[in-house]
Image: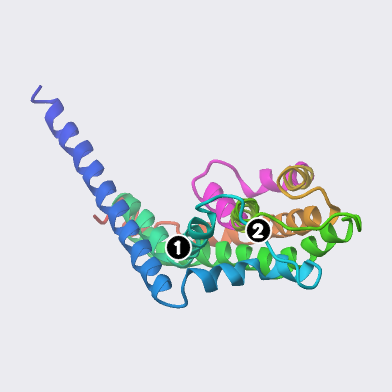
Amino acid sequence: MTVQAPAEETFISHLVELRDRLVRAAIGVAIICAGLFAWPGPATIYNFLAAPMLASLPPGAMMIATGVSAPFMVPMKVTLMLALIISLPWVFYQLWAFIAPGLYAHEKRLVLPLVLSSSLLFMAGVAFCYFFVFRNVFHFIASFAPASITVMPDIENYLDFVMAMCLAFGATFEVPVVVVILVRMGLVSVEKLRSIRSYTIVGSFVIAAIITPPDGFSMLALAIPMCLLYELGLLLAPAFVRATQAPPEDDLTVTK
């Protein structure tokens, strides 16, 4: 029992640290969410989110709410989603801060670039989806509606669709970070990733076909950036590995 005590104490201390980091991340999201509630407000935020769909509808057409609580809950969910996206740098920082004690001093210097790049890439994916993909996809879908059908999308279904698409594009834009981390951890080499490039391209189009609506434009809009970002990760990975290699005098020193 006495031999197990230090290990148990270490495990509990890690759980406490993880809890504290999760609480801090949640507090950051809550603060941003409260600020968005104060200005510009959930209704304004939802109107901004719904703008691409409304622009594709016939003049005078509106979206509808079939649920009793939908007019209240949907703008709340949209505001929370935006708060989470805005607070991503803080959330990612808490994640990296949790694992930082186990890193070497030279590796800790790369935490900030990884946090910033992960956050910016996710936001870039969401922005690309909203400003480029939505504007074209909704017009494409609306153009196929027969004249006898009045297109009146339900706001809850629209929110589910938008959140799924934004999450898909945000995660897609994290591909360079994933490639860099896999190479840095030694799980796979750059040469191996280059040798399976053709399989990666096929996989990108398969994933895009599953996630996106059944039209060629949205599939290409997801698959092509995925392939390009994969290549970007292959270019950046060697430089990242060199930058995080331990200097000879520090290779046995871990800074806690």
- Residue 119: percent from the left, percent from the top? 50, 64
Q: Earlier in the sequence, mark 2 or mark 1?
A: 2
Q: Give the residue drawn at x 81%, y 58%.
A: 150
* Residue 88 badge: 1
Front position in the image: 103 or 74 = 74
Q: Quadrant of residue 169?
A: bottom right
Crowd around label 2: few <14 · some 14–19 · many ≥20 (10 Å) = few
- Residue 192 magenta-highlighted: yes
Element on which disc 2 rests: loop
Q: Is residue 181 magenta?
A: yes
Disc 1 is placed on an element classified as: helix
Q: Quadrant of residue 246?
A: bottom left
How far separated are the C-alphas under marks 2 and 1? 31 Å
Q: Is residue 174 above or below residue 38?
A: above
Q: Give how far across and how far down residue 16 sits, in percent.
A: 21, 45
Q: Which residues are magenta?
A: 174-200
Which of 36/104 is in front? 36
Residue 5, quarter of the rendered image: top left
Left or right of 145: which side holds 138?
left
**Vertical placement of residue 113 versus 255, above or below:** below
The extreme left residue here reads: 2
Question: Which of pointers 2 and 1 indicates the residue nearer the eye?
Answer: 2
In the rendered image, residue 220, in percent from the top left (x then y), is placed at 80, 56
Circle 2 sits on which residue?
64
Quarter of the N terminus within the rendering: top left
Give the image's coloring scheme.
Answer: rainbow
Amino acid at circle 2: Ile
Assign the magenta stretch its main secondary structure. Answer: helix
Give the residue type that dot 1 points to. Leu
Q: Position of residue 6 (x, y in %)?
A: 14, 34
